[in-house]
Amino acid sequence: MEQALMLAREAAQAGEVPVGAVLVRGEEMVCQARNRREKLHDPTAHAEMLCLREGARLLGDWRLRECTLYVTLEPCPMCAGAMVMSQLGQCVFGAADERQGCCGSVYDLPGDSALHGVTRWQGGVMAAECQALLKEFFSNKRKA
């Protein structure tokens, strides 16, 4: 999670919403990403989406059952859906997202039995640090 938080700080410095993600299989880091929506002019360029895409490419398989995604913010509906579709083994996130979070805050998309999801999730890891970074970013944005 510390690596994901470092990536989130880089995102903030680049004017992106500060979210970072790291995909791990066993003890091996597969890939990492940070939000790039502004730079790429791509609404899907969330850290999680970029990490899942690159991880699948590097591993040569879209099924990520043996992988864990560490991300600084609770995944949104799009990212949680991609986790389910990739059969991601586990998602560990930092700050809860009370507005759009789909791993327990607003909705539990990975846990919806109708979707036959296999993704387990755990929230609140380094939550204070992740939340502080988001709060500072949006506070500065409102002042600008």
Image (cartoon, grey):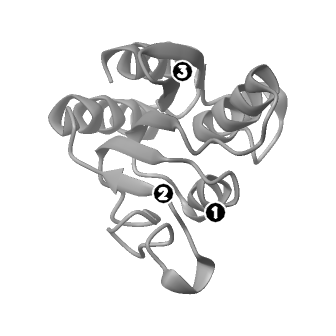
Q: Nearer the viewer, residue 70 or 116?
A: 116
In terms of image quadrants, where is residue 111?
Answer: bottom left
Q: Residues within 10 Å of mark 2 (few under 14, many from 20)?
A: many
* Residue in the picture at 29% in, 38% down: 135
Residue 81: image tag: 1
Residue 119: image tag: 2
Percent coordinates x, y for residue 36 in the rendering: 69, 28
Q: Residues within 10 Å of mark 1 (few under 14, many from 20)?
A: some
Q: Nearer the viewer, residue 63 or 5?
A: 63
N-terminal-most mark, 1 or 2: 1
Residue highlighted by disc 3: 11
What number of labels is visible?
3
Label 1: which secondary element: helix
Label 3: which secondary element: helix
N-terminal-most mark, 3 or 1: 3
Left or right of 128: which side holds 3?
Answer: right
Q: CA distance from mark 1 to mark 2?
A: 10 Å
Say which amino acid is labelled 2. Answer: Thr
* Residue in the picture at 42% in, 22% down: 4
